[in-house]
Image (spheres, grey):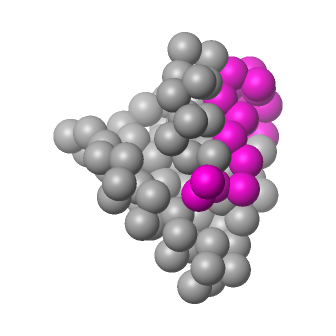
Amino acid sequence: YPTEVLKVIIKKIRFEFGKKVIVVGSSDEKELLKKTFEDTADYVVAGDLTFCQVSSLLRYASLLIVQDSSLMHSAYVQNLNFVALFGA
């Protein structure tokens, strides 16, 4: 998904709604995500957590914004609030 659009969404969530934003991803994405979102997100934990740890972390989220992925399915199974981005 276009990073500039995601940055706008993150800023709105942080500054207009006062929520913390955590960006997660794989270890392959770690450097790119840290470089891209270090000035926007509160935390970037790409590659720092296992899938099970991230899935557990999701239950504390007010909202998950996710691409069509295994995390989306994990959020669905846990009956969490999420917005799924398709065609990303």
Q: Position of residue 61 (x, y in %)?
A: 70, 60
The answer to whether 81 appears left or right of 78 in the picture is: left
Image x and y of residue 20, in percent: 72, 65
Image point (51%, 41%), residue name: 36
Residue 76 picture location, percent across and down = 52, 48
| Quarter residue 71 falls in | top right
- The image quarter containing residue 1 is top left
Number of marks in the image?
0
Say which of 15 and 63 sits in front. Answer: 15
The structure residue drawn at horizontal position 59% and vertical position 57%, both measured from the top left corner, is: 40
In the rendered image, residue 11, in percent from the top left (x then y), is placed at 53, 69
Query: Considering depth in this image, is 70 or 44 the residue closer to the camera?
Result: 44
Quick check: 20 left or right of 29? right
Is residue 78 among what the camera can see?
Answer: no
In the rendered image, the vertical position of residue 13 relative to residue 87, given as above or below: below
- Asked if 4 appears above or below 45 in the picture, the reply is below
Q: Is residue 50 left or right of residue 72?
A: right
View extreme (top): residue: 28
Question: Does the magenta run of residues contain 46?
Answer: yes
- Of residues 29 and 77, the one drawn nearer to the viewer in this rendering: 29
Q: Going 59% across and 24% down the picture, which residue do you hit?
A: 31
Q: Is residue 46 above or below residue 8?
A: above
Q: Is residue 87 visible from the viewing direction of this image? A: yes
State the quadrant of the C terminus: top left
Q: Is residue 11 above or below residue 70?
A: below
Outermost residue toward the bottom?
16
- Please provide the residue range marked out in magenta: 39-56
**Residue sitting at x 68%, y 21%:** 47
